Amino acid sequence: MRPLSADDLDSDAAWLREVELRPDRWRDDDTRAVGLEQQGALVAAGMLWTSRAHADRYWAEIVVHPQSRRQGLGRSVFAHLGALRRRDLPFMTRGYVDEERLAFAFALGARTIQVVPPASVSTARRSVLRQHPSVVPASRVAFPRVMAAHAAMYEWIHRSWSPVADRFAEVVNAGLDEDLDLEASALALDADGGVRALAAVYRDVDPPVVCAETTRPDDADGERLVEGCLRYALDVLSARGVVDVEFDGHVTDPHFLPNWAKLAPGGRWFLLVEVPPHE
């Protein structure tokens, strides 16, 4: 077992590109990457890192050469990554329910911490959602207030299962001025102009990604406000000729999920899981 280098990642080994890997300590001592050699050849690799938006778990990625799989090498890499942790935190990973990566995680003792339902939504389904008079395009609101609403939404929807780090807002709002479609994104405002709900449309991907929720968890009209924000966003996208969008949310998002369900989404279920370290 040895540190993974930039030269390793620059090689023509296609199997190394099955997951996203980086050289050892690419950011700091919480970002480690290792390679496992047999007879002078690299046969497995893995890395751990901490999210800059969250501080509760290490993320992990592991890949094994196709001809060396099911020999326990992935477990060996995982155990070694566990010994490299600078802090006593569990691991986490994610994937679609039918992916081998999740089967491997569950074999290591993983438990599900979050579920993401199918994400593909047709804008043609938007008529099942009602409009709301308090909804305006995000372009009509000063951008610092949009960023504050975006961060507030992110913080509380992760609070119960993956609490945010101290400076999370800098991370989740980084590049938002370029990534957020302000004309398609929608805000539900109160009588004083405060933001109660948000449907954020990200234009840096194709198809566009939509994430929506209230800015605080206890809004009694939250489901209705999120519905209005989503209807506005889908109306704008449909008028542009956008046929499909991807929703980004969780089954624990109480005001988003009922509206998500009304839109009859398609696709695959996605899990985020926590994995205990192995000795």
Image (cartoon, grey):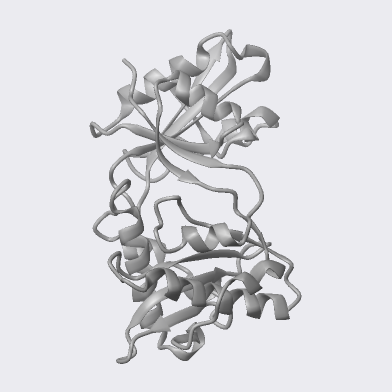
| Placement of 213 over or under 138, stated as above or below | above
Q: Is residue 13 visible?
A: no
From the top left corner, tell me how far across and down residue 98 is, in percent.
Answer: 61, 31
Rendered-image quadrant of the C terminus: top left
Q: Is residue 69 visible?
A: yes
Q: Residue at x 36, y 66 (%)?
A: 153
Residue placed most toward the observer, 157 or 27: 157
Q: Quadrant of the N terminus?
A: top left
Q: Percent from the top left, x then y, of residue 222?
A: 38, 71
Residue at point 72%, 79% (across, down) = 240
Of 95 and 176, nearer the camera is 95
The residue shown at (48%, 28%) is 46
Count of labels in the image? 0
In the picture shown, does residue 268 fall above or below 145?
Answer: above
Residue 53, image x, y percentages: 35, 54
Residue in front for this viewpoint, 39 or 57: 57
Q: In the image shown, does 140 or 218 lie closer to the viewer?
A: 218
Q: Is residue 256 left or right of residue 157?
A: right
Q: Quadrant of residue 171?
A: bottom left
Which residue is depicted at the point 47% across and 91% down?
A: 140
Left or right: 41 as drawn, with respect to 173: right
Give coordinates of residue 76: x percent, y percent: 44, 15
